[in-house]
Amino acid sequence: MPAAADPQFITSRANQLFKDLCRLAQGAGAYREQGLVWVEGEHLCSAALARGWRPQLAVFSRSNWPPAPAGLAQTATKTVVLDDALMARVSGLPSPAPVAFVLDLPAAPALLADAPTVVLDRVQDAGNVGSILRSAAAFGFAQIAALAGTALLWSPKVLRAGMGAHFALRLVEGLAAHDLAALQVPLLATSSHQGELLHRARLPWPCAWVLGHEGQGVSAQLAARAALRLRIAQPGGEESLGVAAAAAICLHASAAAHG
């Protein structure tokens, strides 16, 4: 297997590794099939390295090799250099990044019973999910529990929106509502119109915030199990906040109360 200093150059669209990379980078669920994760761009690659992740494969565009930063170029078991036109075909970005990593998908973890947790109840938009992961990591939540119907956590779009938060969190996905019985922290359910006002509530720590579907909100089943139902004051009179904005406000409130 070539070392990082002796990369494999790929110039043909017929190359099998190039085809595999295209499927991995462009398919939301391809990481489940291949057991690999596509991480694109210097920021995400550096974030993975900073958290102790090591890539199986480093991928560079031809115009970025050899001037690629040594901190990225010398970290993988194998290094591949793609012609710029091929990198553009692999990339999921309008302007392709000059570097990407292929990481091993971590083994599916079990829920930690007492971890500060964010529960995603069928949150479908990849941008919303990634933004929520970013807020969770920023405000001291350690675990994401994603119920079936939520956007796939390791998909390329969620990874880009998460901006590196994935590498700081314990990610558990594909759960059913009854799996949350393993949590030993109180559930706090968000609501647009019902429940106690967030800024007046005494928030427990640790806890598990439940954030619901963009249109339907938290399911009735989970809302009924919540220790608290909370709403955010909106003096401006808007009907509701988007789930990502509501998540940031709620998770910050918990962090502020705990700190």
Image (spheres, helix red, strand yellow):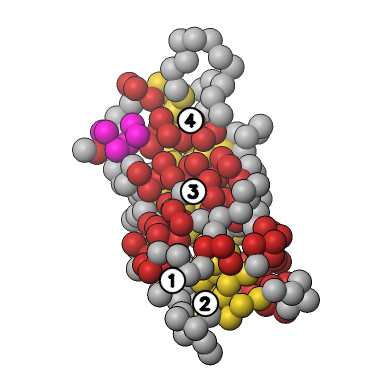
Q: Disc 4 marks which amino acid?
A: Ala
The disc at residue 162 is 3
Range of magenta residues: 252-257
Is 109 contained in the magenta span? no
Q: Secondary structure at mark 1?
A: helix
Q: In this orientation, which residue lies closer to the viewer: 51 or 84?
A: 84
**Disc 1/disc 3 C-alpha distance (Å):** 23 Å
Badge 2 element: strand
Label 2 vs 3, first from the N-terminus = 2
| Number of the front mark, 1 or 3 | 1
- Spatial separation of the CA atoms under disc 2 and disc 1: 8 Å
First in sequence, mark 4 or 2: give its number. 2
- Magenta segment main secondary structure: helix
Task: Report the Cα–Cα distance between label 2 and label 3.
Answer: 25 Å
Label pair 4/2, CB-CB below 8 angstroms: no
Sequence-first disc among 4 and 1: 1
**Extreme residue in the top direction:** 236
Residue 16, labelled with which disc?
none
Whether tag 2 and tag 1 are in contact, CB under 8 A, the answer is: yes
**Residue 85 image position (x, y, % from top left):** 69, 61
The residue pinned by badge 4 equals 246
SS class of the residue under badge 4? helix
Number of marks in picture: 4
The Cα–Cα distance between marks 4 and 3, rounded to whole angstroms, is 16 Å
Q: CA distance from mark 4 to mark 2?
A: 41 Å
SS for tag 3? helix
Q: Was residue 254 drawn as part of the magenta stretch in this picture?
A: yes
* Mark 3 Cα-neighbour bin, 10 Å: few <14, some 14–19, many ≥20: many
Q: Nearer the viewer, mark 2 or mark 3?
A: 2
Specify the amino acid type for callout 1: Ala
Mark with earlier residue (4, 3) = 3
